[in-house]
Amino acid sequence: MIFKKVKEIISKEGVLHFRRWRIISTPWFAIYVHAIYKADEEKHLHNHPWNFWSFVIKGSYTERLPNFKLNPRFVGTSVYRKRDQFHKIEDLHSPVVYTFNVMWGFRDTWGYEVKGNVVDHETYRIMKKNNQI
């Protein structure tokens, strides 16, 4: 089986944050392996444009949920999130975290929770650039 790297996030400073490899992708679901190299830098929680189930296969991290709840994630743990649930990777406890992910229920929109409101990702970037958040 050959995995195809389909996404890589690198900061403006050249720091690698994230890589995604596709195992399978259909109109109904997709399966990926993620490598997480850095915790989320945004101060607000975000959602995703899909429902997902994630299983940690190497490393560990802490996930922040609404109301400042912290969720430790380590090898062998899994989590299910609906696409409208907000979270963020608060802290990595290893140099890299690998997760196996199944995603479904795709849509085009995702965003951040700012003061109880959902702000789409493009507007959020503009607000951040203009120091409005």
Image (spheres, helix red, strand yellow):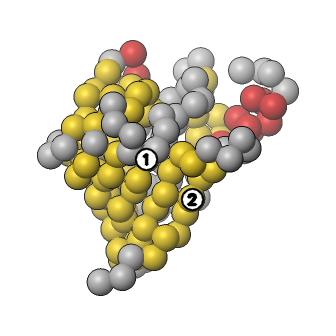
Residue sitting farthest toward the right: 130
Circle 1 residue = 36
Circle 2 residue = 8
Q: Choose top left, top right, bottom left or bottom right for residue 93.
A: top left
Type of amino acid under label 2 = Glu
Q: Residue 105 location, x and y as percent?
A: 40, 61
Q: Choose top left, top right, bottom left or bottom right for residue 84.
A: top left
Q: Choose top left, top right, bottom left or bottom right for residue 123.
A: top right
Q: CA distance from mark 1 to mark 2?
A: 10 Å
**Residue 110 in sight:** no
Residue sitting farthest toward the left: 76
Q: Residues within 10 Å of mark 1 (few under 14, many from 20)?
A: many
**From the viewer's perspective, is 39 left or right of 77?**
right
Up the image or down, 12 lies above or below 132; here it is below
Up the image or down, 35 lies above or below 89; here it is below
Type of amino acid under label 1 = Ile
Q: Residue 7 location, x and y as percent?
A: 55, 63
**Residue 51 in sight:** yes
Residue sitting farthest toward the bottom: 1
Residue under the point 50% across and 51% down: 18
Q: Residue 26 location, x and y as percent?
A: 39, 78
Q: Quadrant of the N terminus?
A: bottom left
Label 2 sits on a secondary structure element that is: strand
**From the viewer's perspective, is 91 left or right of 73?**
right
Q: Residue 119 location, x and y as percent?
A: 65, 34
Q: Quadrant of the C terminus?
A: top right
